[in-house]
Image: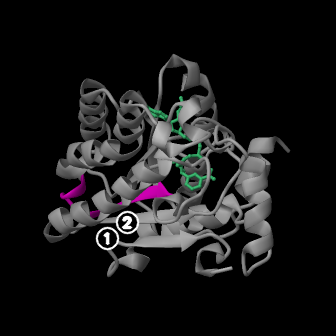
Amino acid sequence: MSELQTAAEKTPFKSDLLKGKKGLVVGVANKRSIAWAVARALSNHGAQLAFTYQGDRLKESVAELAATLPGKSPLYPCDVTQDEEIKKVFAGLGEEFGSLQFLVHAVAFAKKEDLDGRTVDTSRDGFQLALNVSSYSLIALTKAAEPLLEKEGGSVAALTYLGSEKVIPNYNVMGVAKAALESAVRYLAYDLGKKRIRVNGVSAGPVNTLAARGISGFTSMLEGHRHRAPLGRNVEVEEVANTAFFLLSPLSSGITGEVIYCDAGYRIMGA
Ligand code: NAP
């Protein structure tokens, strides 16, 4: 059995809840990506998915993963800082899918030097880059998705982290970006609620991914979470994916503008 199949097997819950529903997943880089785990979960509940990839470097990896899902998964290049590329994604989706029922935002980036040392040393350039990629992109993608999401109503889920509200050393400017992202979740939820479009966040405990390894001291962060979390372990990526599935599915129809923590309970601890 290939590693890809093994990863798929790890998401045990299957249903037809999302049968006939179509969604876009933004943020798959490789098989460890949280976005890929979310895609697997959504597919296990019958959804048809499209994916974006950032540049040709990632095209092959995303195409290989997408090919393991049932049905056809359209792929589009998209650097989320480029409005023209975002426009093309949704023009393509309009033709391919006609409507969209959900959007997954799992994208973040900051310069390596801004994920180490002191937040006070963050450059203007580094700040703008981190917030452009990690926060503004939710607004840009949601706006572009709005005409397709409003057709039948829809749900948007963005991945975030506790560094938005608590100081996590080395998370630095990304904590500021996640605070902006979570605030955007609430404002977008307000704007789009009457169009039956819900917007929520999933705040995941640390998961060993490419982006996470860019944070200085990430391994000790994992260790620290494991020791302190009430569940006495780190969260599994499939658990994060199932939380996103819940927020993207009709099971959460009364919830919008919220951030749900999937972190083995870490956030509730005071000491
Ligand atoms: P990941 O696999 O590295 O995913 C991050 C994705 O963002 C990659 O696909 C990356 O593409 C993409 N990206 C960066 N800049 C982009 C741009 N300009 N345009 C389009 N895509 C861009 O890491 P991950 O941990 O799964 O991250 C997914 C989300 O989960 C992020 O929002 C992250 O902050 C959040 N999160 C992660 C953790 C964790 O511990 N891992 C915890 C809580 C929340 P490239 O590889 O090409 O840069």
Q: Is 110 a magenta residue? A: no
Q: Earlier in the sequence, mark 2 or mark 1?
A: 2
The residue tagged with tag 1: helix, strand or loop?
loop
Q: Is residue 262 visible?
A: yes
User: In the picture, which quadrant includes the C terminus?
Assistant: bottom right
| Front one among 152 and 136 | 136
Instruction: Tell me how many marks there are.
Output: 2
| Front one among 19 and 176 | 176
Q: Crowdedness of circle 2 by 10 Å Cα count: few (<14), some, many (20+)? A: many
Return the x and y of residue 183 as percentages of the image width and height. Answer: 31, 61
| Front one among 90 and 143 | 143
Left or right, 82 with reference to 261: left
| Front one among 115 and 266 | 115
Return the x and y of residue 26 as percentages of the image width and height. Answer: 45, 42
Amino acid type, mark 2:
Asn
Name the residue: 70% across, 66% down: 235
Taking the image in four quarters, ligand 1 sits in the one at: top right
Pointers 2 and 1 in contact (CB under 8 A)? Answer: yes
Q: Which residue is mark 2?
A: 200
Left or right, 61 with reference to 53: right
Tell me which segment is drawn in magenta: 149-160
For the residues labelled 2 and 1, the Cα–Cα distance comes to 5 Å
User: In the picture, which quadrant includes the N terminus?
Assistant: top right
Left or right, 146 with reference to 223: left
Q: Which residue is mark 1?
A: 257
Residue 241 placement: quadrant: bottom right
Q: Is residue 233 visible?
A: no
Amino acid type, mark 1:
Gly
- Where 126 sits versus 27, above or below? above
- Where 197 sits versus 111, above or below? below
Q: Crowdedness of circle 1 by 10 Å Cα count: few (<14), some, many (20+)? A: many
Q: Is 152 a magenta residue? A: yes
